[in-house]
Amino acid sequence: MLPSLLTTDDLQGRVVVVFDVLRATTTMAAALQAGAREIRIFDSLDKAQQAWKLFQGSKLLAGEKNCLPPPGFDMGNSPGDFTPGRCQDRTIFMSTTNGTRALVAARQASLLLAGAVVNASATARAILDFQQPVTLLCAGTDGKIALEDLHGAGVVMEEIGISNLLLENDEAYLAFQQSLSDPTGDRLYISQGGKNILRARLDQDICYAGQRNVIPFAVRICDVSGQLVASTHRISEV
């Protein structure tokens, strides 16, 4: 339910899917759908900015602090803002409060994916294709359990299908039941993360993140020369 609860056994020899439904993992999928070449992931704003400055290609610097773009950044963390006009063929350097930090915490996984409601079906297909034990990791909000991330994990479990599931702990059952009892994702609006976004007047971010299966590919994260890089992952590529 939180990156702070991760153990080595949760990572080694396992597929790890990180959920920051509001908003980082949703935004990564949106940016790649909009034509971004890749997304480079960092656990601090300073690291993202330093790497962005050194990069010579077409690029964008994306991040968020208190839900809004930090000074000097091109983009925030709102998925709807990542349009083809802004993203096409660009490398995005991204750091967020919760999601990118969770991905960095899970970088020792056998296979690392960024999961969301918007690409839940594709994420489920990738999980099934790799045929390894799976850890679903919720990024949380400021070190606390996030209802929207449990929902995202549950939606992916729904897409995997009950006949293919062997749940290892009660937390997994809670996430599964959360999504089954909220098929429309309305609880995204009442979660703490949702309330933070509403206070920032970014209501459309929640609407975007709650859409099921509007993006047809999974998002895979690989370690490339010491940097985590997210790119489009389709089953045909395996």
Image (spheres, grey):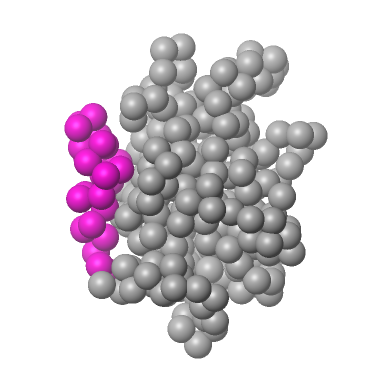
Residue positioned 53% across, 68% down in the render: 124
- The reply to whether residue 40 is visible in this rendering is yes
Q: In this view, does 129 lie above or below 201?
A: below
Query: Which residue is located at x 26 percent, y 72 percent?
Result: 181
Residue 155 location (% of width, % of height): 40, 67
Q: Residue at x 50, y 87 (%)?
A: 163
The location of residue 233, given as percent across then percent down, is 63, 55
In the picture, measured across the screen, residue 53 lies left or right of residue 122, that is right
Is residue 189 rendered magenta in the image? yes
Q: Give the range drawn in magenta.
A: 182-206
114 in relation to 235, above or below: above
Query: As rendered, which of 127 and 150 lies closer to the eye?
Result: 150
Task: Please state the horizontal and vertical placement of residue 200, each as a whole percent of the image.
Answer: 23, 29
User: Please, what is the dominant secondary structure of the magenta stretch?
Assistant: helix
- Res 217 visible: no
Across and down, in percent, residue 14 comes to 68, 64
Q: Which quadrant does the C terminus fall into?
A: bottom right
Compared across the picture, whether 122 is left or right of 145 comes to right
Residue at 46%, 17% in the rendered image: 73
Number of numbered tags placed on the structure image: 0
Depicted 104 relative to depicted 58: above or below:
below
Q: Is residue 201 magenta?
A: yes
| The residue positioned farthest toward the bottom in the image shown | 163
